[in-house]
Amino acid sequence: MPAAPTILERPQRWDAAFDANMTEDDVTRLLFTAPFSKMDAEKFPKRTPLREIIRNDMRILKLRKGEIIMRQGDYGTSAFLILQGAARVVLKPDLPPSLLGRQATNKKGIFRTLAQLWNGSRPAEVLSSKLRGENSGLGARQEDDQVHVFLQDVPRVLDKYRTEQMTTGEFFGEIAALSRMARTSTIFADADDTELLEVRWQGLRDLMKYDDALRTHINKIYRERALASYLRATPLFKNLSKEQLATVAEAVEFSTFGDYDWSGEYKRLAQSGSVRPEKEPVIVGEGDYPNGIVLLRAGFARVSQKFGGGERTLNYIGAGQIFGLNEIAHNWRKKDAPVNFQFSLRAIGYTHLLIVPTRVMEEIVLPSLPKNELPPLIEKREDDSDSAPPETAAREKVGAEVLEFLTENRFFNGTATMVIDLDRCTRCDDCVRACASTHDNNPRFLRHGPSAGRLMIANACMHCADPVCMIGCPTGAIHRESFAGQVVINPATCIGCKSCFTNCPYDAIRMVEVRDERGELLVDQEMKPIAKATKCDLCVENHGGPSCERACPHGALTRMNLNNLDSLSKWLKL
Amino acid sequence: MNRFRRQLFFGLFALLAATAGALWLNAKYNALPNYAYLTGWALLAGMFVLTIYNVRKKLPFLPLGKSETWLQIHIYLGFFTTLLFLIHLNFRAPHGWFEITLAWLFVLVSGSGIVGLFFSRVLPRRLATRGGEVIFEKIPALRHALKTEAETLSLGTDTKSVVIAEFYTKRLASFFTDPKNFWKHIVESRRAVNALLAELEDLRRFANDTEKEKIEKLTALVRQKDGLDYHRALQLALRLWLFVHIPLTYGLMIFTALHIVLVFGFSGGAR
């Protein structure tokens, strides 16, 4: 007789509140505070009432003067409202990396490079006394389970850098939270007893959905601060005048699909082997009327086509790429033979996108394009035809198996993924030894990982386009070395909290116990070993690029941006 | 033309050009006094460049260029150095125990290099085709896990099958305990494992339904173990040749140094 199934209560939206300590009194107080006091609670559906959004998607933070709220370049999924006190935003130029707990990365000089010749015999993972005693200009205090990092010399910061104060009732961080983009400014508390309300993105999304005023407010600042500059940088709009661009910006709609916390969900689905396109949120359905082009602002989406009882992947697109231009350009030129969307577009993980309506495309954008820049007309596709239109060229470039493999495992997120050609790799481990020689005698990756045919993606940090590891680092130790640059960890300010280690969906970060120069484990007051997060840093301090790649005698290993299938295709055809 | 074909094309072109040039120079200047000195020093220079590739490998943190480029130079220079070696010998067999030993060391170093080149071009593709990629150092642990599983299946307390227990003890125990069929895997022969699988298949004639199920599971484990042995054999071959190539290189360099001392100390100069 088959065993009885385990019955569980279906997981709900608010199974895990943002802050379990949020009290009824807190919620009631917030309901009487602007902007919530001005919201019409009746407009919220019964399943997601305003009160429950406040209770489950928000938390109150109490900060002291100088404590950092966010750093420029951080990734975060929350917005903040000042309930009491003040915050101060650092205007350009931002504070130096050392004041933010980051490492000012410099290439090794000739002496440090040569010193590695005799440092090879040192014990692994030594945290030098210099790094241990490094005063970064930051201090930290622990309250409950939260670490608050503060600037130690606020007067000097105020004196030396241009800043601006924000006071009670001001809202900030909402654009980065909604679009999953890097924070654009550093903000710290400007008064003792500053009280902030942190709203996680799910709550912000729902508030925007049911409250017109907040939606209008956020849309307005989005258009003012982020959209105009983004559109100006998009090649499709390069021929538009300032006025035309303003009209386009006014008409653009934006939307977010999927789940920002995709990494945890992805890990679970990947382990159960049930990552399937059919389960991903549909942005555009195959056969739908093309009512606008889709511009991906952040995240990734899968282009798929119905095949038998399921969907087959034809391509994946990432930030900056466009979907639906072919159909709309075709319909504009062939009004007598219009076509619908030829493929489906589904959010992988999460996707933040802009939609330029067809009317605006036809009246303003398409007429501005020279004929040779318009996409080719769409030929009518027979149902049983396997011919690949331009958008499906990716499938031809790397093959169906590899494309499905990269998409299923979400490797397209990597901007410097370690790709190994198993047909050429002699398993000599020269890459591993080179990595260990360059990094404290401990390799920062595993020469092993998922594979498809001759392609293996090794277990190494991919320096993701969407670096979920950077969300929640309390000290800013994990950061990008430059804008869109390598993701690195500053060992001097890493407190071993495991936040990045837990967040990384690819298990590319490891916690290691650190030692002193004699090889003895470093321990805290409770005699527990001190651990630090480590991962591949692409040999950012070394000359000549990643040592793993340079060490491969057979050209079997490369670091590659997998969002660009051209380079992968070229490399595979070696 | 892809990168590797381009490398091959330019490498072969350079090698052929250098070979033609060396043979022409040899024909023209062979009769010159001190000619053996010239070819000797050229040979030594070639051997020196070949040897320092290993030093480059040990210093990955220094910006000394890609290992891939070094290997290409190593391969083609290796072939050219063999020609220089023959020219230095004046295309005659060496004489005297010292020269013969030196020549043999050169031949063994070159030969092991050629074997290594062949292995590194052929075996990785075979490993990738076979699948089941595994880290070499983890193989013993995986083998042990397979053995435990097979043992539990065949000899465990819930097993009352004499047929399976006897077959396991006689035929499978040693198969699961140690690495097997090294040479057969190298030459891509499946004869041994097919014979074992056939014996397992034969066993079904004496088995009831429960035992048949166990035999099926054992068959799957035998296939997994065979795959593990295959990876071990090929990955070991990809490493072993270096254990010949590198120590002999050190031997060759020591004998070469002695050869130079002898030439200058006792011969009064080579002619």
Image (cartoon, coloured by chain):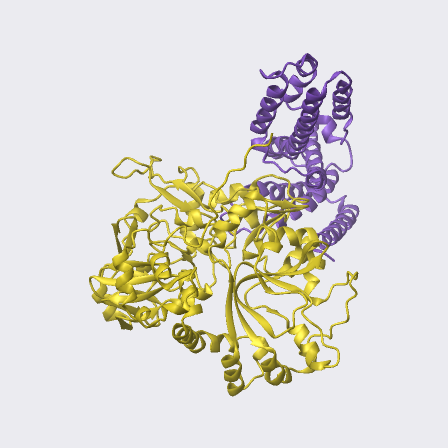
Chain colours: A yellow, B purple
Residue A561 vs A90, above or below: the answer is above
Which residue is painted at 35% across and 35% down in the image? A519
Judging depth in this view, the residue of A198 and A391 nearest the camera is: A198
Residue A125 vs A562, above or below: the answer is above
Give x and y (percent) for residue A309. Answer: 70, 53
Answer with left or right where residue A126 lies relative to residue A253.
Answer: left
Answer with left or right where residue A166 lies relative to residue B216.
Answer: left
Quadrant in which the N terminus of chain A appears: top right
Judging depth in this view, the residue of A146 and A473 nearest the camera is: A146
Judging depth in this view, the residue of A372 and B15 nearest the camera is: A372
Q: Is residue A22 visible?
A: yes
Which residue is painted at 70% across and 77% down in the image? A330
Give x and y (percent) for residue A371. Answer: 69, 82
Answer with left or right where residue A349 lies relative to residue A185.
Answer: right
Answer with left or right where residue A230 lies relative to residue B258.
Answer: left
Which residue is painted at 78% across and 37% down in the image? B91
Q: Is residue B267 visible?
A: no
Give x and y (percent) for residue A448. Answer: 57, 41
Which residue is painted at 78% across and 19% down in the image? B202
Give x and y (percent) for residue A44. Answer: 41, 66
**Total marks placed:** 0
